[in-house]
Image (cartoon, grey):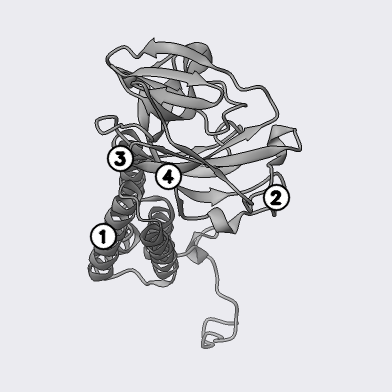
Amino acid sequence: MTANEPPNPYSPPTSSSSDGRANAPPPAANAAESVRGAATAAALLGFPLGAGFYILGRRRPAVAFASAGILVGALATASIRAPAPKLFLIALGAAVGLWLAAALGTMKARPGPTPVRRAAPWTIVPIALALLINAAVKHWLIEAFQIPAGSMIPTLLVGDHVLVRKGRADITRGDVIVFEFPADRSVDYVKRVVAMGGDTVEVRSGVVSVNGAEIPQAEVKNDPNPCPTEIGEPGCWFARETSGARTYTIMFDEHPAQDHPRTVIPPGEVFVLGDNRNNSYDSRRWGTVPVDHIKGVVTMTWWSRGLGVTDVRWSRVGSAIH
């Protein structure tokens, strides 16, 4: 092409520099992608639910999702502490649905006219807030535990995942509690309270007496529950026991029952037994539990799975613990 010829519109574009910077995406596009990445991370991992929309500059959906998430979270917490298993399952389903909607909505949404500046710090804030709130809830309100052994059969089975109402102020006879094992406080145990500080307790031939009165037991005839495989014996039988305001099922088998002599429980301590009465390592062997070792009361089972990966016990999901 000579100096007098017009430029060829079909010729390839020329680079303004040898390193091809003229073909690089404009800074605005890079900024938009950075904001979207930060918003997606906040939506998946952060709190509140609308954090991703907030980073994108979409304030209305951010407020809507945040408000709905806080409401559902409060409802779930209240249903666990009550306990109200059906309400908990509804709240859990709503929480999962809101989380998915917020995450997918954030991924598809376009940045608004005023997205946040410096997206990276705004990703850290909601994620750190989520971790902080999770730690606070676990410390003061609710904590989840998995049952690793069979000492509480038939109330709790190996593989049950339970939720615990934190606190020790309202502990009473009949409560199923999680506590730090007195001999090693790094280990958590789960048992049932049968006597409180100041009570006189005795266990003889499987029957518990508190303050001179036997805790009522009624043998369950033709119980539909089979003998659990965890006990390692073919023969077992069940009884309904009433302690305090709770009535629950306990189990005996062919192992010899362990007695406990008449003992006065020291103030500020509790005497605990497993519902699998002949196969429980409990206060009959190692003594009482100081109240300040108690983490809380088991209220419900939120998940349960046997030994197999697909062995889900659906009937136990969302069941209250008595």
Vertical relation: 200 (above or below) 133: above
Q: Is residue 18 visible?
A: no
In this figure, which residue is indicated by the disc labeled 1? 71
In this figure, which residue is indicated by the disc labeled 2? 309
Q: Evaluate if marks 3 and 4 touch, with contact meaning CB atoms under 8 Å apart.
A: no
- Going by the numbered disc 3, the residue's amino acid type is Leu
Sequence-first tag of 3 and 4: 3
At horizontal 68% and vertical 41% (from top left) the residue drawn is 228
Q: Residues within 10 Å of mark 1 (few under 14, many from 20)?
A: few
Q: Position of residue 263 (x, y in %)?
A: 40, 11
In this figure, which residue is indicated by the disc labeled 4? 322
Q: CA distance from mark 3 to mark 4?
A: 19 Å
Sequence-first tag of 1 and 3: 1
Secondary element at image label 4: loop
Q: CA distance from mark 1 to mark 3?
A: 16 Å
In this figure, which residue is indicated by the disc labeled 3? 141
- Going by the numbered disc 2, the residue's amino acid type is Val
Q: CA distance from mark 2 to mark 4?
A: 27 Å
Q: Position of residue 59 (x, y in %)?
A: 23, 66
At horizontal 40% and vertical 70% (from top left) the residue drawn is 105
Q: Position of residue 56 (x, y in %)?
A: 32, 63
Q: Is residue 261 visible?
A: yes
